[in-house]
Image: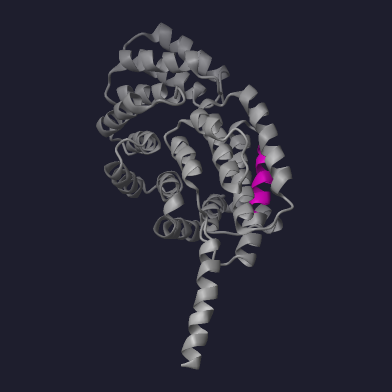
Amino acid sequence: IKASLQACFFLFVLVPATRAQQWHFDDATRKAYNLVLNLQARQACALIPNPATPQQAYVVSLAHAVELGLTENEKLREQYEQTYENLVDRYEKKQSADVYFLLAEMHLQWAFIYLKAGHEFDAALSLKEGYALVQACKQKFPAYTAIQKTSGILEIIIGAVPEKYAWVLSLMGIHGTTTSGMQQLAAVQISDAELALETKVWHALAAAFVLQETWRAMQTISALIAQDSTNCLALFTGAVLALKNAESDQAWVWLNQFNLLNKGLPVYYGFYLVGEICLQRTEYDKAIEAYQYFLKHYSGVNYVKDAHFKTGLCYLLNGDTSQARAAFAQARHAGK
């Protein structure tokens, strides 16, 4: 009896501590987070004008990362970078599982932002900072599930680095494998309901673009859309993955659903996708129109070169060699 009472007391003490180690949104912050996952980044930030908790800071940082990822707006990047640095300064001396997760995620988000902007050195530093925070969190809070999301993405990135550059990562003390990364993302999907949707999207993207298992990615995203056919992030990701899998009809369906539902950021990259779909369907005039709309409104540099090239390709397939030559000439100089 004494042993049983001791065991019960141990569990009474342990279980609340274990639960306290898990990432959790309050109702108001969860509402803002769900807006971000519907690509309503600015509406989400409006609900959290002054982030006061790690969870609120995470939502604001994610909203900024989503907006910069979709728009590549340089002026906004400078503005949001100041917010990022202020949040890092505020939390870097605090030590809790939630803080480690927040900082690791922010560094990972900005590694992507810097990389897309062509700032490779800053991206590498952010990646290294994120990796160090993940390792520290795992060591101090081994039962903390959420960190596996960050760790999984990092390991997938590290594992995808070509072997001839692996020595650089070893020199920096960075190690990881794609297999381990995918396993960690799968574990978060099962055990952490708060981050499940976001993690499933990451899992699908990694399967398609790193492992080249697009069929696997399509299974994941199709299940997500079946579960919630109104989520803009899932629909948009589904359209991208369907196109990669040469399923232009399915991509068209999901992209149309996305356009009907999207009440957030104007996603001009979507017009690039429309061009890709029309090109696959041999609807060359419609493809040219979509690529030109994308080029006129998009403020970034990625996909610009390809949009010019595909425009030239459409003109060529239409038999207009003069316009094709002009578009190919633009492709040589515009974008990246």
**Whether residue 270 is visible:** yes
Query: Residue 214 lies in magenta, yes or no?
Result: no
Residue 268 occupies quadrant: top left
Query: Residue 122 lies in magenta, yes or no?
Result: yes
The single residue placed furthest to the top in the displayed view is 322
**Where's residue 7, x and y in %?**
50, 84
Say whether residue 206 is left or right of residue 86.
left
Instruction: Check the picture and name the quadrant holding the C terminus.
Output: top right
**Whether residue 69 is visible:** no
Give the dominant element type of the magenta stretch: helix, strand or loop.
helix
**Where's residue 122, x and y in %?**
69, 39
Q: Residue at x 34, y 44 (%)?
A: 221
The residues colored magenta run 119-131
Q: Residue at x 71, y 38 (%)?
A: 86
The single residue placed furthest to the bottom in the displayed view is 1
Q: Residue at x 43, y 44 (%)?
A: 205
**Where's residue 134, x and y in %?**
62, 57
Q: How many marks?
A: 0
Does residue 68 sit above or below 201 in this rendering?
above
**Where's residue 114, x and y in %?**
63, 35
